[in-house]
Image (cartoon, grey):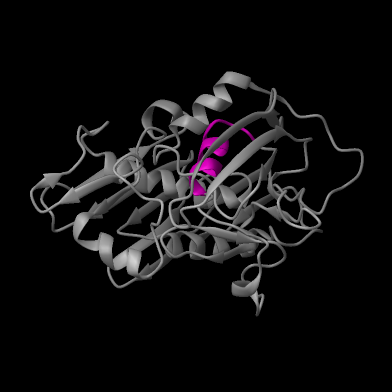
Amino acid sequence: MTNYTLGAAFERSGIGLHSGITTTVRVLPAAAGAGRYFVRVDLPGTPVIPARVEAVSTTMLSTQLRAGNGETSVNSSDSEETVGTVEHLLAALAGSGVDHACIEIDGPEVPLLDGSALAWVKAIQEVGIVESERLQTSSPLSLLPSSMLVKEPIWVNQDDAFVAALPASMTRFTYGIDFENPAIGNQWHSWTPEQEHFAEAIAPARTFGLANQVDQLRDRGLIKGGSLENALVCGDHGWLNPPLRFSNEPVRHKLLDLVGDLSLLGKFPVAHFLAYKASHNLHIQLARLLARQIGAWDVSRQSSAVIGN
């Protein structure tokens, strides 16, 4: 299977949603087998953080990765070797067909930019994508399954929220949300990569929040970098910063988050991913189940797998 990387490097800077810290990200081409991975260039030893599901350390309103094994490390909260809010950039890379990329960052959180993946996609389009050159030696990061086929349904739920991977003839994502606020209400959206371009259908959708939750989240040390410039905010009487880019922009953004979280598998399995009122936590639980079933964490596993047999 042909693998792709960037035609050249690009750089973007901005403020992190939760940390409020301004960082610069430089995304560079990488050889086939390298995968997508972060490098904390501001830390001693420039630690490498693979963009893989086993590196996930926290999922509180975003997805954070940590060097080593994020899921099982006892001291993950004390480690500086992390990178947060990775989902939009990773969705842009995966949605644009970039299999391998080195992402250098000089701080703890990926910039939010305008709250969507659009600026990342435009940067990728500017430099283009090319076929990756193969690594001469094997890499511990080069664990990208090339063909994964879901044969049996896999579900993760919490109360009435759920996310599932269902057997399908092609990869498809469907998402639903349901808010009491009438400006959002009940929304659904479905995206099939083979039929619609990510850049047009999903990437422009911005992150969103409720005005009555802003103070509570900031009291918890979150959304320090959030503003009306980088997030849609909905009040009791409607959106505070219209217009929306799509009539159902909120649910499209949730689908964007799901794409970014499932990109931590390397390649998207052939499945219909169905989610309702889900969260980063549920997304990652599903990704971990898929990874374990296909043996994606096992260096000795084969390059293709059938899931559910």
Farthest-out residue, left? 237
Give the magenta part as a residue range: 87-98
Please name the predominant secondary structure of the magenta segment in the image: helix
* Left or right: 271, with 211 as reference point: right
In depth, the one of 47 and 195 nearer the eye is 47
Q: Residue at x 68, y 43 (%)?
A: 104
Q: Residue 22: x percent and y percent? A: 53, 46
- Answer above or below: position of 66 versus 138: below
Q: Residue 296: x percent and y percent? A: 68, 57
* Quadrant position of residue 24: top right
Farthest-out residue, right? 136
* Left or right: 170, with 29 as reference point: left
* Quadrant position of residue 228: top left
In depth, the one of 68 and 296 nearer the eye is 68
Q: Residue at x 55, y 52 (%)?
A: 109
Residue 195 seen in the figure: no
Residue 307 seen in the figure: yes
Q: Residue 87: x percent and y percent? A: 50, 48
- Answer above or below: position of 30 versus 209: above
Q: Residue 236: x percent and y percent? A: 10, 54
* Left or right: 157, with 39 as reference point: left
